[in-house]
Image (spheres, coloured by chain):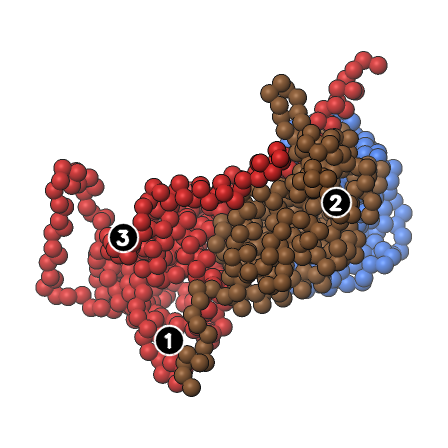
Amino acid sequence: MSLDTLTRPWKAFSYGFLDASAKREMRRKILKAIAVPGCQMPYASREVPIARGWGTGGLQATLTLVNPGSVVKVIDQGADDSVNAASIRRFIARVSGAATTLDTVQATIIQSRHRVPEEKLRADQVLVLQVPNPEPLRPVEPNMSVARQMHADADYGRMWLQLYEQIVRSGRVMQGASYPSLVNGRHVMTPSPIPRWDVPKLNMAKHLTILSAGREKRLFAVPPFTRVEPLVFDDVPYRVEDHAGLTCHRSGARGVFMNEIPQEDGTSLHEVSDSQLGVKLLNGEAPGEMWYRDGVFRP
Amino acid sequence: MAYVATRGGERAIEQAERLYRAQMGEVTPARVAEIERALPSLIDRVMGEASLYAPDLAALALAQSGGDLYEALLLLRAWRSTQPRLQIAAPVTQDRMLTHRRISAAFKDIPGGQILGPTLDYSHRLLATEVVQGETFTPVPVEKAANPAPACHPSLAAWQQAQGLVAAPSLAPVDRDSIPDLTKEPLLFPAKRAHTLQSLARADTGGVLALGYSAMRGYGNAHPTVNELRLSEAEVIVRHPNGTEFSAGRVKTSQAEVVTTKGQGTLRLGFCATLGWNEVKTIAGATLDLNAPGAPKGSPVNEEFFLYHTEPVESSGFCIHFKLPHYVTFQSSLDALRDAKAQRNKTEEPA
Amino acid sequence: MERAAPRLVRAQPLLRMADVSKRYGDVVALEHVSAEVYPGEVLGIVGESGSGKSTLLRMMNLEELPDEGRYSLDLPGVPEHLFAMDGYARRMLRARHIGIVYQNPHLGLLMKNSSSGNVAERLLVAGERRFSVLREKAKQSLEASEFPLERMDAPPIELSGGMQQRVQLAKAIALEPAVLLLDEPTTGLDVSVQALVLDTLKRLQRERRITMVIVSHDLGVIRTMADRVMVMRRGRVVEAGLVDQVFQDPQAAYTQALVHAKL
């Protein structure tokens, strides 16, 4: 018996980059986050080889979940070919050997920044959302210790007040993306800066959503079949972006979230924000089942 | 197909990285060795912020990143985060450290004496332009002292404690293996003392200086006096599996202790230490520590405020992340804005 | 100014504090202080700064806990020993049943939110989720506090001191609190403004029979507002009784000095 037979050959890092102790902590925190939906779980958050604020939280969750049989899709602002999405996808494949895909339907893990795909997710898929700021209370309470106390008390009066103020000042709720939402009737969370269009996709969904903020070291989750209710007054309904009537100038598609492309003549063109869906439609392929039909959300 | 033609992300990022690396040329072992030899202060600063004592790796990171400090730091932190924590070294006390420099501004002389050690404090900051003319700048050799200073020096605070000038710290004996480790646990507030000191030790030098300076200028309530500034080498005592303890080597450390006379009866101390020799960071860090107790939330000397905002990997990463596209969030806000404007125009129209 | 006639009091006090003591290090803030407030009455607490009167009020607001003593509010579904409740229960009780107006409006108001929003927040905490109702109730509350409604959406930071106190008052009464605590509510205001704010308070008291505790160093304010008065000094109650009785015929030497100095 020699040391050589007892040990494995030296490698620069473990499978999936993170070492076993980091993965163990992540698994525990993910389980805790699933157990208390919408509640932010602090975690150590290791440094990973991309910069903080560039998806390190999502990356740590993905690296913990990934295995050689995984099929990984990475999107940024809806696009698979966005430079940072490309960089993260390449990194995950490099350290895990997992397959990558651009197709939502094929993927087992979807790591995303600021969008939920337009094709419905299934129970066997996990959505990992990159979160820049995990604290919905930050605009009303920048101090994290105080904000934690407010969550513990379910003291969301000032959160609602913010909506009241927006209506008083501007005649409507002005919250754009990151629309604060009550999870499982208990914790207010930020759904990460996904547009309002995407928030209903998290409510009572079949898939698990993990939201992870690496820089801020907080992780939370929306388990399958969990209520996610945007904070709205009883007499002022929730409104998604007014995109239902827009037409994609490339594919002719309608009824999905669009990117606006300003034109030199002062007008705008629109294109499907979910880039791979756009490709499918252009190629005449049938997309998977969609969350929205004719611009109306169908749960 | 037009849509596919724009999907050049992968190739673009690869070429962009090549462009950056083309500026630097080859990274050779000789270049790394020269950086390590020629730039000890920079190496020390980077090792402290990386919380990884490895001069050769620090030099490599600097070479590989072309001298971008935050990039070098991220390389080292990301490397460090994958390494197992094999052991926790035995705690070291000030009077057991090999001390190169130890000064106090609080007294003219102190027990053990003021030891100036290596410093540029009293140099004339004249650029050695002769080097540009082709000459070599050769430092004048150090002369031997008639009476060499002892290797170890007592801590000044110990003398002050004996005099009843500072309150003795309430030190509960801590099992070394149960010292909290910031790299394995999240930082929560009120922070554990160990987390506070570890966080300061790996904080951004520039950031700590900026906030510490704001406290010195009057945004803090306590004016610091340097009680003791110490540059030393500490033995890393670890345990062999058979139980014997041995030194695995020495690491350079800096420590600053600042003091304020404001208080009830006794002096109050602020403390900061880091790996490597970095005087500015430890003095500024100790000033923040001194001012932290009772500081209002949101003030620069509030612990949560300065620890969060001086984390170099987090702050620099977040800063550069604003280069990432944000068009979805922008689109979402634009939608609300346009609608609000349309409503306003409607109500302003005469009925 | 018209003095409120002493009202009939019922046998059961609404607010009861018994034998409350508090020290900060060597400083005695309160020593064996007891107080009772009956439904619909106004208790005045008078004393110089450092007498402990504001500390006592903060305890009535459950912002601070004593070293010893008991506190109860005779309300359905509220536990008997309020100091023994955990922090969450204390905060919830305060939000539902206690209104407070601070001398310093920064303590009571979100200065950059709208004035109506400051009032609405109380209702939001209590679970109101209809925007139109929030709006209407905020308006009613501000109106009752004689706040000019055309400014209801201006942030307090843009308002005068007197107006800020009216916003605080509107916020405090929005949920019809069991007890309204007033901590030097008119101190620092111009004399004319002070009189107007006191008028509003008196009218509200008369119309709504709100149980109030008012703390002031100003005997005039106490005389105008209170039915009964407690005179405090160095953390103790030196004298207590009906306002007319105490001010016309003070028993304790300290009260005598206080009353004569004021006259």
| Front residue of B128 and B17 | B17
Q: Secondary structure at mark 3?
A: helix
| Front residue of A25 and B79 | B79
Q: Position of residue A37 (x, y in %)?
A: 72, 58
Q: Are marks 2 and 1 in contact (CB under 8 Å)?
A: no
Q: Residues within 10 Å of mark 2 (few under 14, many from 20)?
A: some
* Residue C75 in view: yes
Q: Colour of chain C?
A: blue
Q: Secondary structure at mark 1?
A: strand
Give amino acid for label 2: Pro
Q: In the figure, is residue B316 to the left or right of C207?
A: left
Give amino acid for label 3: Arg
Q: Nearer the viewer, mark 3 or mark 2?
A: 2
Q: Position of residue A121 (x, y in %)?
A: 74, 52
> Which chain is disc 1 placed on?
B
Q: Residue at x 34, y 41 (%)?
A: B23
Q: In the figure, is residue A233 to the left or right of B133?
A: right
Mark number displayed over residue B238: 1
- Above-or-below relation of B118 to C43: below
Q: Residue at x 42, y 86 (%)?
A: A1
Q: Residues within 10 Å of mark 1 (few under 14, many from 20)?
A: some
Q: Position of residue A232 (x, y in %)?
A: 78, 41
Q: Nearer the viewer, mark 2 or mark 1?
A: 2
Chain with colour brown in the figure: A
Q: Colour of chain B?
A: red
Mark number displayed over residue A287: 2
Q: CA distance from mark 1 to mark 3?
A: 32 Å
Q: Residue at x 75, y 55 (%)?
A: A122
Q: Quadrant of the C terminus of chain C?
A: top right
